[in-house]
């Protein structure tokens, strides 16, 4: 039985296969409409979520399956003190696969070690968010047609942002990816990401403070919000939250084919006037998350659909 705790659980080849499957699902949804009939997905979310939880539920429903679960720790037996290990043992008798979000790092990993069904890490504290990373990779490939030979700017909260950490871990495995790390000094990436991921994999990177200076060189701008829930005191949060705001004027400095991504939710780090720019792809990014999660569910459940329609190659082939 296989689980998904980190993007690194999949080889580059397996990631390519997942994205090819997601592309086929997006192009031919009717072919997969009954793939999970009789299967149930449990969404066990110990902290709030809109996109991730609903996209998992949408993914399973589009595959013909059913969903059950809870949307906060207060609405589960965790409020009575039940451990994650005991909860997943119970859930294993009710569902065929589980997506779990938890504020404590490593909680989904603990669950996977006690589970009788595949467990997907839907976010654990400031640690990993693998399905967001799969969404990001699929979006980049769908829109640019490649995951190599790109310059990506990661802007905002690079210290606490689990989406940024996961995406860096995934992209360093592709050749000629240059990282521009845009943040105030207080929110720079942790040293373990810098040393154990970027430098260990001989990735090129630069750390800068000013977004405007970096815009002309970027193929992708990945904006993040400053997350209030990751700060220990409100004073630090208030001082940092408005440090970077993407505006129409800043967009004018970028390439005509650059794309803007954001894991969402947005607070005020992207002005609403940018939404009308054709390079703003964050809402499309959220939509594409459903298809890659459908592909992941099918893969972990071991469900194979006869490829009556040829799947496009992710390496050098056409993109969705």
Image (cartoon, rainbow, N blue to C red):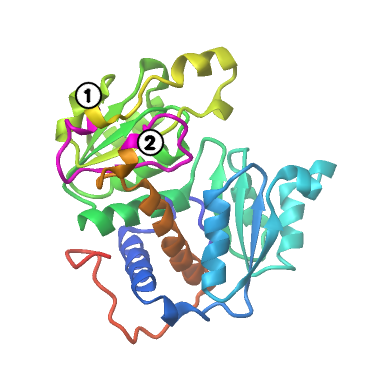
In which image quadrant can residue 138 be found? Answer: bottom left
Circle 2 Cα neighbour tier, 10 Å, few/some/many (<14 / 14–19 / ≥20):
few
| Crowd rating for badge 1 (residues with CA inside 10 Å; few <14, some 14–19, many 20+) | some
Residues in magenta, as a range:
250-273
Residue 148: image location, x then y, percent: 20, 50
**Occupied quadrant, residue 199:** top left
Q: Which residue is mark 1?
A: 212
The residues tagged by marks 1 and 2 sit, at their Cα atoms, a distance apart of 18 Å
Is residue 10 highlighted in magenta?
Answer: no
Local secondary structure at mark 2: helix
Residue 108, horizontal then vertical, whole percent: 61, 49
**Mark 1 or 2 closer to N-term?**
1
Residue 304 visible: no
Residue 130 screen position, x and y as percent: 46, 50
- Tell me whether the residue at label 1 lies in contact with that at label 2, contact meaning CB atoms closer than 8 angstroms: no
**Label 1 element class:** helix
Q: Residue placed at 48% from the left, 46% from the top?
A: 129
Q: Count all numbered tags in the image, as a single digit.
A: 2
Q: Nearer the viewer, residue 24 or 103?
A: 24
Which residue does the image show at 49% across and 71% down from the upper left?
A: 298
Find residue 248 and report its image quarter: top left
Mark toward the viewer: 1 or 2: 2
Q: Quadrant of the C terminus?
A: bottom left
In the image, what residue occupies the spot 67% across and 45% down?
Answer: 46
Mark 2 lies on residue: 272
Would residue 152 be found to the left or right of residue 103 on screen? left
* Residue 41 as seen in the image, left or right of residue 277: right
- What secondary structure prevails in the magenta region? loop
- Compared to 313, does 236 lie above or below? above
């Amino acid at each position: 039985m296989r689980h998904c705790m980190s993007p690194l659980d999949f080889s580059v080849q397996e990631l390519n296969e997942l994205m090819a499957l997601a592309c086929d699902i997006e192009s031919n949804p009717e072919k997969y409409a009954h793939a999970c009939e009789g299967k149930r997905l449990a969404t066990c979310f110990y902290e709030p979520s809109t996109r991730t939880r609903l996209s998992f539920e949408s993914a399973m429903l589009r595959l013909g399956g059913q969903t059950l679960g809870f949307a906060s720790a207060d609405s589960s037996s965790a409020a009575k003190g039940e451990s994650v290990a005991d909860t997943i043992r119970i859930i294993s008798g009710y569902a065929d696969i589980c997506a779990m979000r938890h504020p404590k790092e490593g909680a989904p990993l603990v669950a996977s070690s006690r589970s009788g069904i595949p467990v997907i890490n839907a976010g654990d504290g400031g640690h990993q968010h693998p399905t967001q990373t799969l969404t990001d990779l699929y979006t980049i490939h769908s829109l640019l047609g490649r995951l190599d030979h790109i310059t990506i700017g990661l802007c905002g909260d690079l210290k606490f942002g689990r989406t940024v950490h996961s995406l860096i871990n995934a992209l360093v495995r592709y050749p000629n990816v240059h990282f521009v790390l845009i943040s105030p000094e207080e929110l720079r990436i942790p040293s373990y990401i810098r040393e154990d991921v970027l430098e260990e994999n001989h990735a090129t990177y630069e750390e800068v403070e000013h977004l405007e200076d970096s815009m002309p060189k970027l193929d992708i701008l990945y904006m993040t919000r400053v997350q209030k829930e990751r700060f220990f005191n409100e004073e630090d949060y208030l001082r940092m939250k408005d440090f970077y705001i993407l505006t129409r004027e800043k967009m004018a400095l970028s390439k005509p084919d650059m794309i803007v991504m954001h894991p969402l939710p947005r607070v005020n780090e992207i002005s609403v006037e940018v939404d009308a720019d054709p390079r703003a792809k964050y809402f499309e990014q959220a939509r594409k998350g459903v298809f890659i999660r459908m592909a992941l569910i099918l893969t972990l459940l071991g469900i194979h659909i006869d490829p009556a329609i040829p799947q496009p190659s992710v390496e050098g082939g056409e993109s969705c």
